[in-house]
Image (tube, coloured by chain):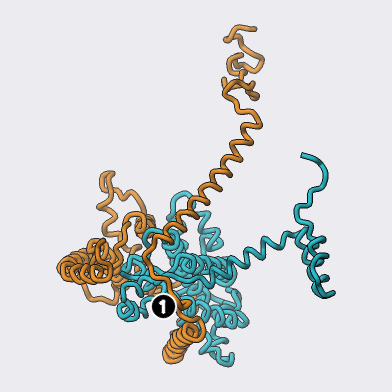
């Protein structure tokens, strides 16, 4: 064993030539190390657990079904033929007819061929991406988000992208944030207000995207883009809160009549 | 345990004890022979289970139970928006397949900047020379518009009736993915005619992709085939529009509807 600081042929020391101090590649089995049969048992145990869980959930289902107060039908549901089929055919042909009608009376405008050399005065996607396009025009608020002496932290495009991500993120998270059995907007005025605000925001963002068509000062338009959704949300909340009393009274009465308390 | 062959069920003896016709004997022999090898009985049980599932005595639905039929049917149009988007999707698929016979995804043929390219010319050809072509393109375009509109309204309906709640979170997320893909469908289709608006919409797409940190340049390469628009962009958008997205979106719609089928429609209170 040489001294640690003894120079080696490549100029380093013996210390560097060693491994990084980790454990040796093979670990001798000790009391804690599971044997192969134990490992096998454990994996079978998982399967066992899964099986037991499924049994339990099946039992749970069955219990719920037997305890249920639902009245079993004596007919087998709404007949697929002819009732459901005819209804679906009617709806389908109605929609198809509407689409063909609209397509025949309003064929699309076809513009000039692409010219990479001349940027048109108005660049627009199809109407359903206006909101997205509007999100790319948030540059007036970009400097406000700056922290470093007025220099913008991110490009305007990146700001738009982050706004997209935020919107999609919030929409995705909705079912995890709003739980419970409420199904009507009146039952949850806050969430209904949020939804209305979202819809209005989509519309105002679309208007922001086609700002050229609106003879409104940009400052005012930009304020309206964010004020109108808030206003819409507040109004919705107020209206629903007011309606709620009457609605809930009606609902409770109906539920009470149908399902008197035990 | 002995190594002697066990045969709990002596099927052959049972067969002999029965008074069977030749056809029955042949059938049963074949069946037993197959069943010993393929265990058909399991699949028969599966079929049986499915039969009873399909013909289950359903409990009364929520609407029936609480006599909400009038309410439900009043709002029914809002409950057919998902169906409308599928119908529009199918119409777009059919008309799109027909358009695909005539469309050429190529930027060739432009002598100078701003001249019509092969893609643009093929669109003009579809609209002026092809029998029914003008209508065909119009149908394709409008069915796409209808699909997007229906998908948006469908989402609103689901939101405002709280249909995304507890057991249906996964389907909500799937729906969000489907909306994003529908928009991508629309965007890629918008680029294909290689009009001024198509080109500059794609230009914004490239700029957006490039503005993304870390994966930006990679995304621009993947989706637009480079940092400047050209033949590669058009072909990528074309393949995305007619090959990748149709498969992905169709599969996701199938799963989406399948989950609705399994979980049932969330009826309003």
In percent of the image, x 78 and y 52: which residue is there?
B7
Q: In the image shown, does A228 or A74 lie closer to the viewer?
A: A74
Residue A218, given in percent of the width and then of the height, sits at 23, 68
Residue drawn at x 40%, y 72% is B60
| Residue A189, above or below A111 | above
Q: In this view, does B263 lie to the left or right of A242?
A: right
Q: Picture quarter containing residue B103?
A: bottom right
Q: Quadrant of the C terminus of chain A?
A: bottom left
At x 49% / y 79%, what residue is drawn? B87
Tell me the quarter of the picture where residue B36 sits. bottom right
Reading the image, the residue beneath label 1 is B80
Q: Mark 1 lies on which chain?
A: B
Instruction: Identify whether B92 is placed above or below B9.
Output: below
Q: Is mark 1 on a helix, strand or loop?
A: loop
Where residue B145 sits, quadrant-wise, is bottom left
Chain painted in orange in the figure = A
- Residue furthest toward the right? B22
Instruction: Count the marks.
Output: 1
Please identify the quadrant where the N terminus of chain A is shown. Answer: top right
Q: B215 or B114, which is in the foreground?
A: B215
């Amino acid at each position: 064993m040489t001294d640690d600081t003894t120079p080696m042929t490549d100029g380093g020391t013996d210390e560097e030539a060693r491994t990084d101090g980790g454990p040796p590649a093979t670990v001798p089995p000790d009391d804690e190390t599971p044997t192969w049969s134990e490992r096998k048992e454990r994996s079978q145990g998982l399967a066992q657990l899964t099986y037991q869980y499924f049994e339990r959930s099946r039992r749970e289902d069955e219990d719920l079904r037997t305890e249920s107060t639902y009245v079993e039908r004596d007919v087998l549901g709404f007949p697929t033929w002819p009732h459901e089929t005819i209804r679906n055919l009617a709806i389908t042909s109605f929609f198809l007819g509407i689409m063909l009608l609209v397509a025949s009376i309003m064929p699309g405008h076809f513009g000039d061929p692409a010219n990479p050399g001349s940027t048109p005065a108005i660049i627009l996607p199809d109407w359903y991406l206006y909101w997205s396009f509007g999100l790319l025009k948030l540059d007036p608020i970009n400097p406000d988000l700056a922290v470093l002496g007025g220099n913008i932290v991110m490009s305007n495009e990146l700001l738009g992208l982050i706004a997209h991500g935020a919107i999609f993120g919030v929409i995705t998270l909705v079912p995890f944030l709003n739980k419970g059995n409420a199904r009507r907007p009146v039952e949850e005025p806050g969430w209904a207000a949020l939804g209305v605000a979202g819809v209005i925001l989509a519309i105002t963002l679309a208007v922001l995207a086609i700002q050229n068509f609106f003879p409104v000062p940009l400052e005012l338009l930009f304020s309206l883009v964010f004020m109108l959704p808030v206003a819409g949300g507040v109004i919705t909340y107020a209206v629903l809160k007011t309606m709620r009393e009457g609605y809930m009274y009606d609902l409770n009465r109906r539920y009470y009549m149908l399902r008197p308390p035990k | 345990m002995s190594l002697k062959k066990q045969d709990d069920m002596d099927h052959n003896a049972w067969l002999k004890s029965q008074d069977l016709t030749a056809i029955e004997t042949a059938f049963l022999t074949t069946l037993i022979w197959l069943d010993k090898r393929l265990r058909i009985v399991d699949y028969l049980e599966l079929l049986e289970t499915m039969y009873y599932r399909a013909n289950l005595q359903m409990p009364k639905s929520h609407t029936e139970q609480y006599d909400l039929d009038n309410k439900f049917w009043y709002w029914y149009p809002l409950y057919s928006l998902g169906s409308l988007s599928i119908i529009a999707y199918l119409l777009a698929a059919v008309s799109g397949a027909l358009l695909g016979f005539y469309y050429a995804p190529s930027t060739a043929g432009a002598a100078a900047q701003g001249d019509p390219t092969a893609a643009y010319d093929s669109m003009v050809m579809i609209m002026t020379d092809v029998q029914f072509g003008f209508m065909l393109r119009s149908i394709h375009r409008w069915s796409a518009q209808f699909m997007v509109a229906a998908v948006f309204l469908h989402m609103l309906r689901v939101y405002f009736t709280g249909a995304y709640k507890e057991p249906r979170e996964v389907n909500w997320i799937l729906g969000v993915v489907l909306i994003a893909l529908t928009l991508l469908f629309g965007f890629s289709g918008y680029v294909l005619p290689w009009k001024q608006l198509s080109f500059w919409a794609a230009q914004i797409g490239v700029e957006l992709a490039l503005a993304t940190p870390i994966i930006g340049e990679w995304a621009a390469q993947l989706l637009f085939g480079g940092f400047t628009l050209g033949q590669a962009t058009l072909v990528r958008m074309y393949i995305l529009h007619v090959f990748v997205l149709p498969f992905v979106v169709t599969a996701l719609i199938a799963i989406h509807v399948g989950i609705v089928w399994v979980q049932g429609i969330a009826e309003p209170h």
